[in-house]
Image (cartoon, helix red, strand yellow):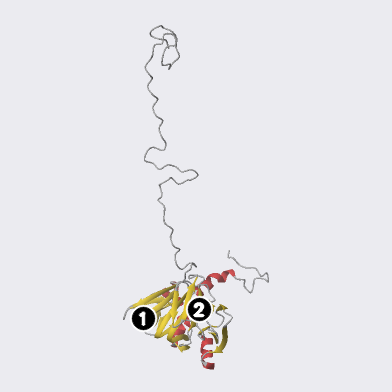
Amino acid sequence: MTCPTCQAPIQDGSPFCPRCGTQFAAPPPYPPQQQYPPQGYPQQPPNSYAPQGAYPPQPPQPPPPGYGQPPYPQHGFGGVNVAIEHAGSFALAVVTLGPEQSIQAESGAMVSMSVNVELQSQMKGGLMGALKRAVVGESVFISTFTAHGGPGEVTLAPGPIGDIIALNLVNQAFFVQSGSFLAAAPTIDINSKLGGAKSFFSGEGLFLIGAQGTGPLLLSSFGAIRKKSLQPGEQYIVDTGHIVAFESSVQYQLQKAAAGFFRSMTSGEGIVARYTGPGDIYLQTRNLEAFAGVLKPFFPTGNSGGGGGFSFGS
C-alpha cells in the first residue's frame, strides 16, 4: 500500500502516512463474531449435559404410598390399631393393642411382639373345631396375643409372599378360603363351616373358614388383593384358586369355564365359581397351586439316581 499524496510505502491498515502525515479513512470494522448457540436457544451450563432452561425445575414429589414409605395407612378398630407396612409382595401387619386388649391370629403368623404381650395358644372350637380346621389345611391351634400393663405391639405376616388387608366387620359374616385367614379380634367368631360338595369340588376343601362378628379381620393373599363389589343380582365369574374371601350375602355356584368338559379342561381353567351379589368379594392376583406347578419341574425327583441335583429342563 502507498500513500496517495507522496507515494511513500505505508503499512496496510495504518491511519496516516508516516512521511507526509496524510490521514486515511478508518477501515470498516470486522463483522461481529456469531454467538453460539444462536440467540433464543438455551445456553449450555458448565459441567451439565442438560441445556439450561430446557427442563423447568420440578418441585419435590412425595413418595408413592404402598412401597414401604412411611407414614403407613392406619386402620382403627375399637382401640385396636392396625397398620399395613410394605404393602404388596412382602406385607406386614403391625397391630397396636391397648392395655388388656387381645387379638387372635393363625398359629405361626407372629413376626415380633412387645415384651408385655402374652401369647397363649389354644384349640379353637374344641375338638370338632380343631378337626374341621385340620381338614381345610389350617392349623389346629389359634394364637391369642394380649397386652398387659400398657399398650403393646404385635407384628404378623403370612407364610406365602403376598399382601394383607384389614376389614372392619360390623355384624357381618365372611367366608375365607383356606390359608387366607391371618388374624381377627376376639369379638369375631372364627370357625370352619361346612361348604358342601360344591366347596369340595371347587378345590377349596370340604370346609370354609367362617368369620362372623364385629371388629378387625386380617386377610392375606398370594399376590395382590383386588376388591370386587357386586350389586344385587350382579354376577361375576372367578377362578376358584383366586378367591380370598366373600361376604355371606354373596351366593355362588360352580360351573365349567368353557362349554363342554373337554374345552373347559384344555382351557387351563377347569372349574370356576359364578358369584351373585349383593356383597363384596376379594380376589388374589396369583394362584399358589399354579405357582407350585411352575416350580415342580425344578425340584429333584426320586429317580434322579441319588445325585441330589436339580432338573432345569432339557
> In the current view of this chain or complex, which residue is farthest to the front?
21
In terms of image quadrants, where is residue 270?
A: bottom left
Q: Nearer the viewer, mark 2 or mark 1?
A: 2
Q: Residue at x 56, y 89 (%)?
A: 122
**Quadrant of the snapshot with the C terminus:** bottom right
Residue with the mark numbered 1: 279
Q: Residue at x 39, y 85 (%)?
A: 170
Is the C-beta separation of discs 2 and 1 under 8 Å?
A: no
Mark 2: secondary structure: strand
Which one is nearer the viewer's eye here, 73 or 4? 4
Q: Residues within 10 Å of mark 1 (few under 14, many from 20)?
A: some
The relative height of residue 244 versus residue 192 in the rendered view (above or below) is: above
Which one is nearer the viewer's eye here, 217 or 198? 217
Task: Name the residue type under label 2.
Answer: Val
The relative height of residue 269 versus residue 5 in the rendered view (above or below) is: below
> In the current view of this chain or complex, which residue is farthest to the top?
6
What is the count of numbered marks? 2
Residue with the mark numbered 2: 95
> How far is mark 2 from mark 1, CA to CA?
27 Å
